[in-house]
Image (cartoon, helix red, strand yellow):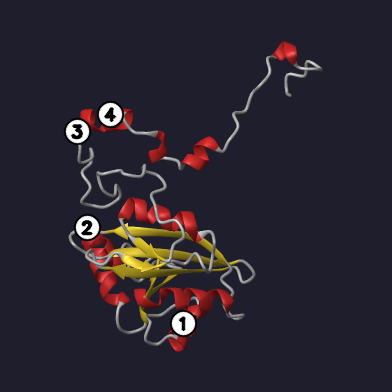
Amino acid sequence: MSATSEPRGAAPDFDLVSLGPSGQRDAQRVRATGSEVPHLNPSVAALRERFPGAVLGNQVMAGDEDVVYVDPSRIVEVLRWLREDPGQHYDHLADVTAVDYGGGRPIEVVYQLWSIPRRAALRLKCELSLDALEVDSATAIWEGANWLEREVYDMYGVEFRGHPDMRRILMPDGYAEGHPLRKDFPLRGRFSRAEQTRRSLTRDPEDHYTPGEIGGREPQLVAPHDERSDGDPER
């Protein structure tokens, strides 16, 4: 193979590598809006036909991962159709996460879907401006969205309307430093280490658990080895 020939199977967008991460994202965002780009998953065409006003664009990532950009105001409608339509049957919500590119750009909420019977994957994205970080919850469609959406809320500050328990899941309730995975979050946090330690040591357990969760459990007692009836160390 000559030095100038392109390797077999090389991605047509390989020249974007020279633009660097920021340039790649900007170029991809231009392609992801407006006109349709070639896709591999037939669900992309089905979505465009079924929801012409809700599908804002599409792109192919990593050579074979179809991504569809959806109007945030209609994301639940689209997700429900993808699960319930017999021709789509995306019965598994593999993940809900988010991406913050920084620089004042919108935060993307990402839904990774999987159709187990069809062995097909599809990724949906909603772009939310920094002054309107709110979107409807998908918990009525997949119960598994509960903790996933709480993590996005905790780490990025995106609120999910209609969520049954919209509170932090990784950081403690009352955590005052913001959302740790945002690009504007300082590397060492917003408070000094001394202040972080002071807040941790003075925090009441009820900041982490509800009174029912604390008082509703009986402590598990383990009898000493010599008090066990049969001396079995595994009991």
Between the residue at mark 2 and the residue at mark 1, the CA separation in whole angstroms equals: 29 Å
Closer to the observer: label 3 or label 2?
Answer: 3
Q: CA distance from mark 3 to mark 2?
A: 24 Å
Q: Residue at x 32, y 64 (%)?
A: 108
Q: Earlier in the sequence, mark 4 or mark 2?
A: 2
Label 4 to label 2: alpha-carbon separation: 29 Å
Q: Which residue is mark 4?
A: 197
Q: Residue under circle 3?
A: 192
Is residue 150 shown to the viewer in this render? yes
| Corner quadrant of residue 226 | top right
Q: Earlier in the sequence, mark 3 or mark 4?
A: 3
The kind of residue on which mark 2 rests is Gly
The crowd level at tag 2 (other Cα within 10 Å; few <14, some 14-19, many 20+) is few
46 versus 2 height, above or below: below
Q: CB atoms at circles 1 and 4 under 8 Å apart? A: no
Is tag 1's residue or tag 3's residue first in the polypeptide sequence? Answer: 1
Relative image position of residue 224 (x, y in whole percent): 68, 14
Amino acid residing under circle 3: Ser
Q: Residue at x 81, y 17 (%)?
A: 230
Q: Locate the C terminus and report the quarter of the image it occupies.
A: top right
Determine which residue is flagged by label 1.
Answer: 47
Q: Is residue 186 left or right of residue 108?
A: left
Question: Residue 5, can we see it?
Answer: no
Q: Residues within 10 Å of mark 3 (few under 14, many from 20)?
A: few
Q: For marks 4 and 2, give the one nearer the viewer.
A: 4
Residue at the disc numbered 2: 102
Q: Are marks 2 and 1 in contact (CB under 8 Å)?
A: no
